[in-house]
Image (cartoon, rainbow, N blue to C red):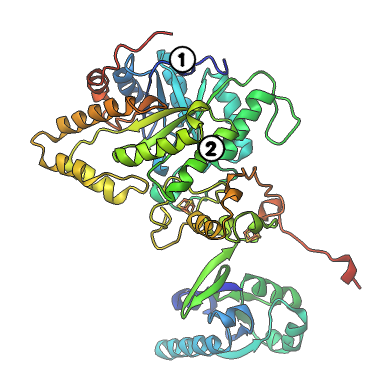
């Protein structure tokens, strides 16, 4: 899933302060699962803002809504009336949702980000999410024991651990596993260490963000 | 001859090589380089010039290397892939060789998190092994990386890389060396050695694979200045192991600096005995004035003329 984290209240407050009617719009998919921008978080943020206004004797009408996915026209459209009624929409979706709601709602709609979109990751346990993929556009997981050095090695190395890997942790942050230690351990357990003897040549970053914004077009699905 | 460098000639003749190290200034104070370099003149066969080591902004290794050449010293230009993509790397190699640089050390580099520009984006377009491949392609094929494009002129470089027998996973360290050898590296400089047992074990694995006959291995040493430094390095520098016995010797010593030099000289004597070690990489960081004493003590002077 896409993992996001809510911005600090102070930052959000400064962002939305000047708008009379605010719609806080949650998203029911990734950010709901990572408990950053779903229905519950919309409710919490709305009441925090209301309390702040009360304390500072400010007036702002706050509406709340959550749709299934902000990256999907089909779910945004039924909500357009509410969106247009507001002076600004505070989207609690990832950066995709923030942009796409505005795209669908038209240029008059002001849509602001309530989250910092962090990464594509997995839920490791209560309250912990960690990055697993960087969307590089050419997956090499079959060459690295199913562990991604692009997203999980701080230096994006392709040919084994740097000289700073010690006791299984990364030199950059002792709280993080060294991706290459993980790769080594897994291939060893599988009896496939010979995979690591091969040099992985320089990667093409063209299919990654370096090549500019990417687009997938599926001819078979075009109407 | 691949490069015709002094280092290549020394190693080619089977002489025991000595390389030193010089960290460029954190600014354009060229006199700092000159002062440090004078301490190294005649004591080493070539001088490594670090490339923004530990991600602290310093004068570029190319410019510093060029200054050394003007002084009549031979540089080993270090280059990290942290700060340059393959366009800048190859362009810098053109420039460096045009300036007379003949040795190059291919590194991925310390993460920017250790330095003084922590908010920087890192590049890591290619890694150190891919960099070796890149330089070798430019030198031996006369083309750019991954292309038919001909290089105007000739790239003559003696290609080096680092190896760290003290990082983990230990058993993989020799595999990584084998990959560097296959990528086309000519010489290797190791991380500084204090744990002699582990180094010997690594060298045994290197010999088992016959790698000592494919690449020249220069064993890295760094004299310790004080017990505090020994403790600090053991605890805080990733990829370095300092056995307790050495820390204890340093802590108990009446004159720690002298003791550090003594230990270093002892280590060099031991390293010379190991089959497959073709030289020493002496990193007397910010202690260049002691290089003479160490080299002399270890019987490495005068340096052979080749
Ligand atoms: S190799 Fe690329 S696509 Fe595959 S997991 Fe890593 S970043 Fe994602
Ligand atoms: S310690 Fe491991 S994960 Fe960290 S930068 Fe080095 S190889 Fe990558």
Give the residue furthest to the left: B254
The CA distance from mark 1 to mark 2 is 25 Å
Q: Which mark is residue A24?
A: none
x then y, percent, for residue B250: 16, 39
Q: Is residue A46 above or below residue A94?
A: below
Which corner quadrant of the image does residue A31 belong to?
Answer: bottom right
Give the residue furthest to the front: B208
* Front residue of this view, candidates B218 and A157: B218
Q: Is ligand 2 less than 8 Å from the beta carbon at label 2?
A: no
Q: Residue at x 50, y 26 (%)?
A: B213
Q: Is residue B157 above or below residue B109?
A: above
Q: Is residue A17 above or below residue A132?
A: below
The residue under label 2 is B178
Q: Chain of mark 2?
A: B
x then y, percent, for residue B102: 52, 20
Give the residue furthest to the right: A223
Instruction: Give the side of residue B187 with respect to residue B248, left or right.
Output: right
Which corner quadrant of the image does residue B227 belong to?
Answer: top left
x then y, percent, for residue A64: 60, 90
Quarter of the picture containing the N terminus of chain B is top right
Q: How many marks?
A: 2
Q: Chain of mark 1?
A: B
The residue under label 1 is B6
Q: Residue at x 27, y 25 (%)?
A: B269
- The 10 Å Cα crowd at callout 2, few under 14, some 14 to 19, many 20 or more, is many
């Amino acid at each position: 899933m896409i993992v996001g984290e809510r911005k600090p209240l102070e930052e959000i407050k400064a962002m939305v302060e000047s708008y009379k009617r605010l719609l806080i719009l949650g998203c029911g998919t990734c950010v709901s699962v990572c408990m950053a921008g779903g229905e519950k978080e919309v409710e919490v943020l709305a009441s925090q803002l209301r309390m702040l206004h009360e304390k500072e004797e400010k007036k702002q009408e706050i509406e709340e809504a959550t749709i299934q996915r902000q990256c999907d026209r089909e779910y945004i459209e039924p909500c357009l009336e509410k969106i247009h009624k507001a002076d600004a929409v505070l989207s609690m979706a990832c950066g995709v949702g923030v942009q796409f709601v505005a795209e669908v709602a038209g240029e008059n709609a002001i849509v602001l980000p309530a989250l910092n979109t962090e990464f594509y990751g997995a839920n490791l346990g209560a309250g912990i999410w960690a990055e697993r993929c960087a969307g590089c556009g050419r997956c090499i997981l079959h060459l690295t024991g199913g562990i991604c050095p692009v997203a999980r090695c701080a230096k994006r190395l392709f040919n084994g651990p740097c000289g700073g890997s010690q006791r299984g942790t990364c030199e950059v942050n002792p709280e993080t596993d060294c991706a290459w230690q993980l790769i080594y351990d897994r291939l060893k357990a599988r009896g496939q260490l010979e995979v690591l003897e091969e040099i992985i040549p320089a990667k093409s970053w063209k299919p990654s963000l370096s090549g500019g914004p990417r687009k997938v077009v599926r001819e078979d699905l075009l109407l | 001859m691949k490069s015709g460098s002094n280092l290549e000639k020394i190693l080619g003749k089977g002489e025991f090589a000595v390389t030193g190290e010089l960290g460029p200034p954190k600014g354009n104070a060229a006199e700092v380089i000159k002062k440090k370099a004078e301490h190294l003149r005649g004591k080493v066969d070539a001088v490594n010039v670090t490339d923004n080591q530990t991600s602290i902004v310093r004068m570029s290794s190319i410019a510093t290397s060029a200054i050394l050449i003007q002084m009549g010293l031979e540089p080993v230009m270090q280059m990290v892939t942290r700060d340059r993509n393959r366009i800048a790397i190859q362009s810098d190699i053109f420039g460096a060789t045009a300036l007379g640089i003949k040795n190059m050390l291919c590194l991925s580099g310390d993460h920017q998190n250790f330095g003084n520009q922590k908010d920087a984006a890192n590049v890591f377009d290619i890694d150190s092994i891919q960099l070796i491949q890149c330089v070798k392609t430019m030198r031996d094929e006369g083309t750019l990386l991954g292309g038919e494009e001909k290089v105007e002129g000739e790239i003559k470089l003696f290609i080096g890389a680092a190896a760290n027998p003290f990082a983990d996973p230990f058993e993989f360290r020799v595999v990584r060396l084998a990959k560097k050898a296959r990528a086309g590296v000519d010489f290797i400089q190791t991380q500084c050695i204090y744990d002699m047992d582990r180094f010997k074990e690594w060298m045994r694995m290197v010999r088992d694979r016959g790698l000592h006959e494919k690449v020249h291995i220069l064993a890295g040493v760094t004299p310790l200045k004080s017990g505090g430094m020994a403790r600090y390095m053991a605890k805080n520098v990733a990829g370095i192991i300092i056995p307790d016995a050495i820390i204890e010797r340093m802590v108990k010593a009446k004159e720690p600096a002298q003791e550090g030099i003594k230990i270093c000289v002892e280590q060099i004597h031991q390293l010379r005995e190991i089959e497959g070690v073709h030289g020493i990489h002496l990193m007397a960081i910010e202690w260049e004035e002691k290089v003479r004493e160490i080299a002399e003590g270890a019987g490495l002077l005068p340096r052979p003329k080749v």
